[in-house]
Amino acid sequence: MFLVGQVPQPSKITGGEQNLPVTISLMSAHGTDSNLTELVEDMARSSYFEKSVNVGKEAFA
């Protein structure tokens, strides 16, 4: 699983807004591990995805 972002979600308990993580899970056919690795590397290099993840309530500040 890869953390790719976060989305705001209203809390039913506090009435405030909480950020929920957005993740993806990838699987590949037998023998295509290198293709999957290249895909993940290309995604990491793209400008759409964040380059680092923070700790605490907000993964991406």
Image (spheres, rainbow, N blue to C red):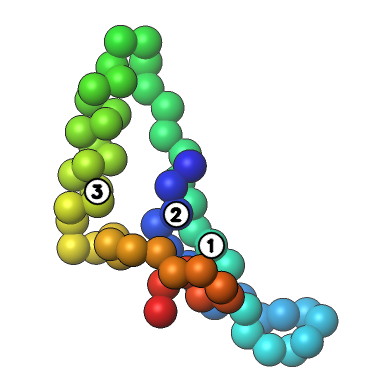
Q: Is residue 22 above or below residue 32?
A: below
Residue type for callout 2 = Leu
- Per the image, the residue denoted by label 1 is 21
Tell whether label 1 touches label 2 (CB within 8 Å).
yes
- Callout 1: 10 Å neighbours few (<14), some, many (20+)? some
Question: Three-letter amino acid code at disc 1?
Answer: Pro
Q: Quadrant of residue 5?
A: bottom left
**x then y, percent, for residue 2:** 43, 47
* Residue ID at (66%, 81%): 10
Q: Which SS class for mark 3?
A: helix
Which residue is under mark 2? 3
CA gap, disc 3 to disc 2?
12 Å
Residue 53 visible? The answer is: yes
Residue 31 pos. (x, y %): 30, 10
First in residue order: circle 2 vs circle 1: 2
Quadrant in the picture for the C terminus: bottom left
